[in-house]
Amino acid sequence: MMQAFTVLNGLVVPLDRSNVDTDAIIPKQYLKSVKRTGFGPNMFDDWRYLEPGEPGMDHSKRTPNPDFVVNQPRYKGAEILLARDNFGCGSSREHAVWALTDYGIRAVIAPSFADIFFNNSFKNGLLPIALDEAIVDQLFREVEAQEGYRLAIDLEAQTITTPSGGVIDFEVDEFRKYCLLNGLDDIGLTLKHADEIRAYEERRRQEAPWLFQE
Amino acid sequence: MSAKTLYDKLWDDHVVRTENDGTSLIYIDRHLVHEVTSPQAFEGLRIAGRQPWRTGSVLAVPDHNVPTTDRTAGIADPVSRLQVETLDQNCRDFHLTEFPMSDIRQGIVHVIGPEQGATLPGMTVVCGDSHTSTHGAFGALAFGIGTSEVEHVLATQCLIQKKMKNMLISVDGKVGAGVTAKDIVLAIIGEIGTAGGTGYAIEFGGEAIRDLSMEGRMTVCNMAIEAGARAGMIAVDDTTIDYVKGRPFAPRDGHWNQAVSAWSALKSDEGAEFDLVVRLDAHSIQPQVTWGTSPEMVIPIDARVPDPADEPDSVKASGIHRALDYMGLQAGMPINEVSIDKAFIGSCTNSRIEDLREAASVVRGHQLADNVKLALVVPGSGLVKEQAEREGLDKIFTEAGFEWREPGCSMCLAMNADRLEPGERCASTSNRNFEGRQGKGGRTHLVSPAMAAAAAIAGHFVDARTLVEKENTQ
């Protein structure tokens, strides 16, 4: 079971760069782990700390980069990441999503997302929301202007409410929404169609037997 | 029946069922597995008490963490070693075919799939690795997936997908002599941008693409993901079929003729409609060099590094400014005046036999420049290495001062010991020039094998064609 996502009222941290790649979200040395957890301290590792990091270090003893936005005290405890276009591009590493969720991020808002990252997010209870660039620009201005800026996200209603009461609608696929609202394991859902998968295989075995040459 | 694109055909052939909102269950023919993105998937299977649906569809290989130096001592880094051993153990426990580190067939997953004939036209091919788009060169639907999806494919042989949109990128006419597949794909990314293909499956077509060997086509499809597209593909023709014939996993006996006849349909029909068509003129493509921290930050070898002052969009201008700063470059400087510290010839983009031949043809008779501290040549597989050695390519490299290594991903992403130190500049045949990709603070310039070889010899970026021409006129 993954963590369900229903409503979230969370502090927003703005990351004002486009094309943030998954190498930046979680650098390669941390991909050596065979676990799904513990990536949070290394989210944005190269930007977040002044010294280079390696797995197994006590990351709480490293020097945080004071210029990196996530380290600023006003954004401590943020649950919503506000980003620019093509967020999550590059490598397919799901560790990028695990780093964000392990840190405490539950939703990312950006003008656009890379396809694989977008898909990986839904498998882990992280809600990626794509909004028009002009709206994202406006949110960046509001977050930077107001300390403690929070957004209320309601997945069922597909709305984001700003502190001034403004309501922004967003799109989400029906199937993904259903899985996220209920925290459903989609392998279990797929296996309900096992008979159809077997029927497909039988048909293909006739049409293209070389695909089943083992 | 209306005209279909190649992607439409591949999609239709693999749909198991479709929901009302278009979400479909897609059947997966080939599942490639490596050590980095699979351990959590196998753990998931164990926790849920599930078994792989079809073990014969899986081919596994360790590639990201493996050392490229002497392997008899195993892997020095205990964390890397554990990850590789975990793959070995998972393959034993679940009865999956694996080429372990000691196997001559071991190599980069996207090199060995095609090499073994495990990648075939008309297949759906997935792997927990974004560069799975490589296999689309065979007229296959191939794309990278996350670890949750790796588990999903292991358990169900299917993926939950929505159909992507169709894009055609046509590279019309012929490229000039000495312009390679890597230059073509970098020029494409420069044209459409790193998000240009987001939401699309890209079919590459046109005379310049048709003229490429399978190795060249794999280079182009490999970097579809750098243009934002999960899947890139090229129609099947005689070049494809000649490459596949006789490979260990290729159709055998009576199936071969039947397969070839089915594969001949794997091209877009006349009049098929694409959501977007992009055309490039092949003649205008020059050897390319990236200058920044995104593959779209690319220029021809005779051009200058851009100036953020010329960019009207403020978000883009600050991106250029940040990239110049990270890369240690001045706005407006000619790229051919930029000197390098290291060179890397390898990766799933450019480590096949033709890539090594291309680099060796530039290196032959030259020496590494004094300012170049290290030049690595890392073949894509044990079999590529063996073939290169039969052709004497290893000698050409080592006599010039290059290091000749064992196969793996190596310095493309520096998960093993091969990496850049902070501030070091590298001419690299890999696919990503992101900040820190080849080591924290490292500066990566993406180029073709010929251009990386030329930079290693000249000590700075230079048009590889001038080195080869000099050679020919002597």
Image (cartoon, coloured by chain):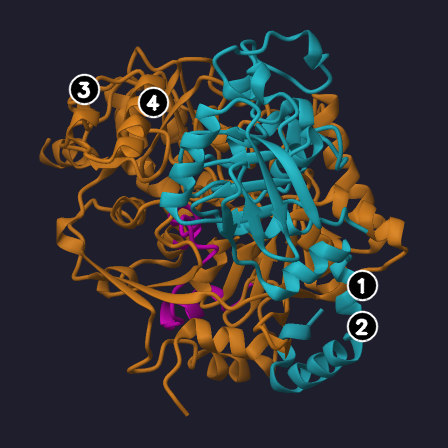
Chain colours: A cyan, B orange
- Badge 4 is on which residue? B322
- Badge 1 is on which residue? A188
What is the x, y in percent for residue B294? 37, 35
The image quarter containing residue B460 is top left
* For residue B349, side relative to residue B128 (left or right): left
What is the x, y in percent for residue A109? 51, 42
Measure how far apart labels 1 and 3 are at the Cα level.
Answer: 58 Å
Q: Amino acid at mark 2?
A: Lys
Residues beneath discs 3 and 4 located on the same chain? yes
Disc 3 or 4, which lies upstream in sequence?
4
- Badge 3 is on which residue? B337
Q: Can residue B364 be spotted in the picture?
A: no
> Which residues make up the magenta segment?
B221-247
Which residue is outermost to the bottom? B1
Q: Can residue B137 be spotted in the picture?
A: yes
Q: Secondary structure at mark 1?
A: helix
Q: Secondary structure at mark 4?
A: helix
* For residue A172, side relative to residue B237 (left or right): right
Q: Amino acid at mark 4?
A: Arg
